[in-house]
Amino acid sequence: MMLELNLTEPNMTTILQINSAARTEAQSTLLANELTAKLQQSHPDATLVVRDLLTNSLPHLDEAALGAFFTPAEQRNAQQQAIIARSDALVAELKAADIIVIGAPMYNFGISSQLKVYFDHVARAGVTFRYTAEGPQGLVTGKKVYVVTARGGKYLGTPADLQTPYLKTFLAFIGLTDVTFIFAEGLNLGEQSKQSGLAAAREAIAAV
């Protein structure tokens, strides 16, 4: 009898941390760092990839980018190929991740422009989503997402919280439906409120 040896290496976990704050030492980034460290304790052999949208900024969508996205591959010019290559790299990084941690501060009731631009570069018809007879279908599936958001006021559960439903909607649109939110609220309402908000976020991180 011949025994077959399984020489394939075990699947390794990849954690992708996306920092989207406009400040290096933003609370959302610091808390996302803490969450990632906690996840690494549970996955000591995990590969960590950090996508910092402040230090590695992306250009806003313009006519050239939209033209590249909607031009068939065989017809793209050199500029369009470069635009697609940048987007493809971001998408490949996203699809390779098993766990995604997004540091997402609230700016003016929504997400940062850095995160919006990132979303614009990874939302690609036929690549991260597709339209079907039943409606849009996300193509980035089978991943766990954590969103860590820091807010100056207290907005959770109020009509002013435009950020949470937007993030849920966009992430689900590309297939990311297993999403846990961690909130640090009231950070600009005095020191006691700040410490209470940070403590609530850290309690949620500890429970992950």
Image (tube, rainbow, N blue to C red):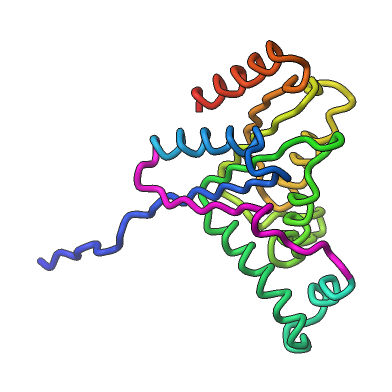
What's the residue at 86%, 36% (across, down)?
108
What's the residue at 57%, 47% (across, down)?
17
Q: In the rendered structure, does residue 38 fall within the stretch colored magenta? A: no
What's the residue at 30%, 63% (across, down)?
8
Image coordinates of residue 70 in percent, x first then y, are 83, 75
What's the residue at 51%, 53% (across, down)?
49
The front one of 147 and 150 is 150
The reply, left or right, for residue 144 in relation to residue 48 is right
The quadrant the N terminus occupies is bottom left
What residue occupies the far left of the structure in this picture? 1
Q: In the rendered structure, does residue 58 fall within the stretch colored magenta? A: yes
Where on the picture, by quarter, is residue 177? top right
In the displayed structure, would residue 43 be above or below residue 141?
above
Magenta stretch in the rendered image: 42-62
The reply, left or right, for residue 69 in relation to residue 182 is right
Image coordinates of residue 144 in percent, x first then y, are 56, 42
In the displayed structure, would residue 144 be above or below residue 66?
above
Image coordinates of residue 34 in percent, x first then y, are 51, 33
The front one of 59 and 162 is 59
Magenta stretch mostly in which secondary structure?
Answer: loop
The front one of 169 and 206 is 206
The reply, left or right, for residue 201 in relation to residue 134 is left
Where on the picture, by quarter, is residue 76? bottom right
